[in-house]
């Protein structure tokens, strides 16, 4: 179907051109100077080359170039690496008469009426359009965007992209488009750019609208004569990857020749899924470059030997045996073997220990610590919260009591004099074992012989902190532990430089926790009954209140009020403790200790106990306002119970479930206790940056690829990168090494944060 067919019949046929108001009066766009007359003596070709400063790209100019620089775009080539996020088939619009309820479609038509109004029922300002093509008309509703009155005018031609839904507000039940994306098209439009073909749709970039980007990029992609290609040639040839330039051209100006609707739809779907050959090539490149950096670090570590040699003597074996309070699981035995093999090798260990909440990582860490200390070295264990650091300190002190090794606690809330004395002992090498929070990596901490550095709950730290801890020793062995199972794709990327050990088995006798979703006030009595029953059976309960930074005070008040209510009205005669981050250290430790000893039966707490806390007799985890928590948080909280052979209850109380997303999270929690499934769901809901805590660093903000949708390409890139790096390193003077060094240099900025240390 041609574009012309879609033009309403009664109108003169517009030749299509963009006419966004801001564009019409845009006199800022600089023209590139004529060849040979470049600014500042630069000779600028009429067709930009890859390295041409972006300012000289037609339609950019100095002011926009400045704004683009802030987005990391400096050259014409950088601009080409800005990928569209979606494609629309604007050569074959959906006819309005054929719109189906629930479908997402792209239509093209003329505005025949527009109006603003307010609704009493939903108390919103509505702006409405009626748009028709040659088949029918459709209502278009925008919520709370009254300024659109000045954007749309009757008679204009518009492209609309959105979901067709029934009008349930006025109960007319007619199909309508709600808050669609729109593009206004005008009379003397250049037909090759914005309509009449499959067009790329870009997100706004700095000052440039998606439409302006399309206008800019189309000629740049078509006119660029060459692009530097970072992929090894032989590799690209073997994998059948097209050239980078061809790929970028296709991405910005895809050619879809097929006339048949099904074939067009398939081509469009492939483009939108990043599954076209051009996309796959760019995605592979992106993943390959990152994996090359990670592999270089991983394999490069084998070159620098540790200053301390670690050996496992019979005496050490004995102390380890005596320290174990129970029989380790087969999985625990296997991972400790892997860890000890690393520790006794000449090369530093860089290992990720992954095991779901409650799988018993602490005892594995304790064994590794004993091996280091038994060799006269120091070991450090870093945890994300003071409460967890305090718990680890208590546990290790107990486990190591028979050895005589001192265990030092370093947290920021320890009194200065105590802390100074501790620092002196650590620097002198008198303290073999140091447990602490971020305090461990502060400047004032100096180890004498740090040989083993362990990070618990690694996902709560950044890569940078891992590097800082590493620098406290000379090539120390590094073990990072995480209880949040990370989907494999993500682990490969964020922790791609680490070896992996997995505890895939729970200690014997564990019973899965039962999870109930409860509705607000109505169901509270039910929750309290369960708690009462468990207390009567000699067990204990957590009751968690959310503490969100913006409203910390208010939330704290809720926790305090709840504590009073629970201890006075709901559970009279039962000792109810209160725990939150504002309590002084001594008080906090006293409450935890009383809960641990079973004197406090119900612990009202904020999320300070979210990770790591281990109270085997606690069998109830009640979470108030569960809708406010993220999936991994809920999983961690639930992980506080079910840590013994007693059955546990997780009571998720929802008070104000506003979004579908919150509902979905709670449903997932009810459906499964499998940490891996929860992690996958979390990844799907929140995206990789949030899940791995690397959002700020931008490491996972791939331009073309997605860790969710392109896993098999990531796997392929990892395998290829590992082989490439191994070959390059085998021949330090060879061509592959030169290429590897160039990749590292060119990409250090982008992936720097992952590639620290
Ligand atoms: P996590 O992996 O979440 O850090 P912990 O190390 O805190 O788990 O262990 C959870 C609980 O399981 C603790 O109470 C611990 O003492 C217990 N535990 C660990 N390993 C075993 C085992 N092999 N047999 C019995 N109990 C174990
Ligand atoms: Mg733990």
Image (cartoon, helix red, strand yellow):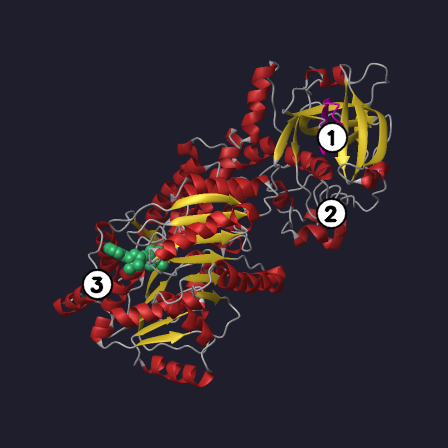
- Quadrant including the N terminus: top right
SS for tag 2? loop
Task: Give the x, y percent position of residue 673.
Answer: 39, 44
Viewer-closest of 217 and 531: 531
Q: Which of pointers 2 and 1 lies earlier in the amino acid sequence? A: 1
Mark 3–mark 1 Cα distance, whole angstroms, equals: 65 Å
Q: From the image, tell me which residue sits under label 1.
A: 169
Q: Is residue 284 above or below residue 240?
A: below
Judge whether residue 351 can be spotted in this image: no
Q: Is residue 415 left or right of residue 49?
A: left
| Part of the protein shown in magenta | 169-183
Q: What element carries label 1?
A: loop
Circle nearer the viewer, 2 or 1:
1
Give how far across and how far down residue 115 sits, in percent: 85, 31
- Residue 245 relative to residue 35: left or right: left
Instruction: From the image, tell me which residue sits under label 3.
Output: 324
Q: Quadrant of ligand 1?
A: bottom left
CA gap between label 2 and label 1 equals: 36 Å
Mark 2 crowdedness (10 Å alpha carbons): few <14, some 14-19, many ≥20: some
For residue 207, the mark is 2
Residue 727 lies, with reference to residue 481, above or below; the image says above
């Amino acid at each position: 179907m041609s574009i012309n067919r879609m033009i309403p019949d009664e109108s003169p046929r517009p030749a299509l051109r963009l006419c966004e108001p801001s564009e019409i009066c845009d006199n800022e766009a600089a023209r590139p100077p004529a060849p040979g007359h470049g600014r500042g003596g630069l000779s600028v070709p009429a067709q930009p080359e890859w390295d041409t400063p972006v300012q000289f790209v037609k339609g950019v100019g100095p002011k926009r170039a400045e704004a683009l620089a802030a987005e990391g775009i400096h050259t014409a080539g950088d601009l080409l690496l800005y990928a569209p996020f979606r494609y629309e088939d604007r050569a074959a619009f959906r006819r309005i008469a054929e719109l189906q309820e629930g479908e997402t479609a792209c239509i093209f038509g003329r505005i025949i009426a527009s109006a603003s109004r307010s609704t009493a029922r939903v108390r919103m300002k509505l702006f409405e359009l009626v748009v028709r093509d040659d088949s029918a008309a459709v209502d278009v509703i925008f919520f709370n965007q009254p300024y659109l009155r000045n954007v749309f005018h009757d008679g204009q031609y518009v492209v609309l992209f959105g979901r067709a839904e029934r009008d349930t507000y006025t109960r007319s039940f007619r199909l309508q488009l709600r808050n669609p994306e729109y593009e206004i098209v005008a009379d003397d439009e250049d037909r090759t750019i914005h309509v009449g073909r499959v067009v790329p749709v870009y997100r706004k970039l700095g000052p440039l609208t998606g439409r302006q980007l399309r206008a800019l990029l189309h000629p740049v992609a078509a006119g660029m004569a060459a692009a530097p290609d970072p992929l090894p040639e032989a590799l690209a040839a073997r994998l059948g990857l097209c050239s980078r330039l061809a790929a970028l051209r296709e991405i910005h100006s895809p050619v879809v020749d097929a006339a048949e609707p099904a074939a067009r739809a398939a081509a469009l779907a492939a483009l939108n899924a990043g599954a076209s050959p051009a996309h796959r090539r760019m995605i592979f490149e992106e993943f390959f470059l990152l994996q090359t950096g990670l592999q270089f670090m991983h394999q490069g570590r084998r070159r620098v030997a540790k200053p301390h040699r670690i050996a496992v003597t019979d005496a050490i074996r004995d102390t380890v045996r005596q320290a174990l309070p129970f029989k380790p699981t087969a999985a625990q035995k296997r991972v400790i073997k892997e860890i000890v093999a690393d520790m006794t090798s000449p090369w530093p260990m860089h290992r990720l220990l992954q095991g779901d909440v409650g799988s018993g990582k602490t005892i594995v860490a304790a064994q590794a610590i004993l091996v280091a200390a038994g060799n006269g070295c120091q070991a450090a264990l870093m945890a994300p919260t003071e409460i967890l650091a305090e718990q680890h300190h208590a546990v290790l002190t107990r486990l190591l009591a028979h050895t005589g090794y001192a265990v030092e606690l370093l947290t920021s809330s320890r009194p200065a004099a105590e802390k100074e004395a501790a620092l002196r002992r650590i620097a002198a090498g008198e303290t073999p074992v140091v447990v602490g929070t971020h305090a461990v990596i502060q400047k004032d901490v100096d180890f004498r012989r740090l040989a083993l550095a362990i990070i618990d709950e690694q996902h709560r730290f950044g890569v940078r902190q891992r590097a800082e801890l590493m620098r406290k020793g000379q090539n120390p062995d590094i073990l990072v532990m995480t209880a949040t199972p990370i989907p494999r794709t993500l682990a490969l990327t964020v922790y791609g430089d680490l070896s992996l050990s997995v505890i895939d088995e729970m200690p014997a006798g564990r019973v899965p926790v039962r999870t109930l979703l409860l509705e607000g006030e109505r169901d509270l009595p039910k929750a309290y009954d369960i708690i009462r029953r468990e207390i009567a059976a000699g067990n204990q309960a957590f009751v968690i209140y959310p503490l969100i930074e913006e409203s910390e005070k208010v939330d704290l008040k809720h926790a305090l009020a709840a504590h009073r209510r629970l201890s006075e009205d709901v559970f009279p005669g039962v000792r109810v403790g209160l725990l939150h981050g504002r309590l002084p250290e001594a008080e906090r430790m006293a409450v935890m200790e009383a809960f641990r000893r079973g004197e406090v039966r119900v612990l009202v707490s904020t999320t300070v106990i979210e990770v790591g806390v281990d109270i085997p007799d606690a069998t109830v985890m009640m979470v108030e306002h569960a809708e406010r928590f993220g999936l991994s948080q809920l999983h961690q909280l639930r992980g506080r119970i079910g840590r013994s052979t007693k059955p546990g209850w997780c009571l998720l109380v929802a008070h104000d479930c506003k979004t579908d997303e919150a509902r979905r999270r709670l449903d997932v929690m009810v459906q499964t206790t499998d940490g891996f499934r929860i992690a996958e769901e979390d990844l799907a809901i929140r995206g990789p940056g949030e899940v791995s805590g690397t959002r700020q660093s931008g490491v996972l903000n791939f331009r073309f690829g997605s860790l969710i949708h392109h896993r098999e390409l990531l796997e392929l890139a990892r395998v290829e990168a590992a082989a490439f790096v191994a070959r390059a390193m085998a021949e330090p003077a060879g061509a592959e090494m030169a290429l590897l060094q160039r990749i590292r240099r060119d990409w250090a900025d982008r992936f720097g944060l992952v590639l620290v240390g």
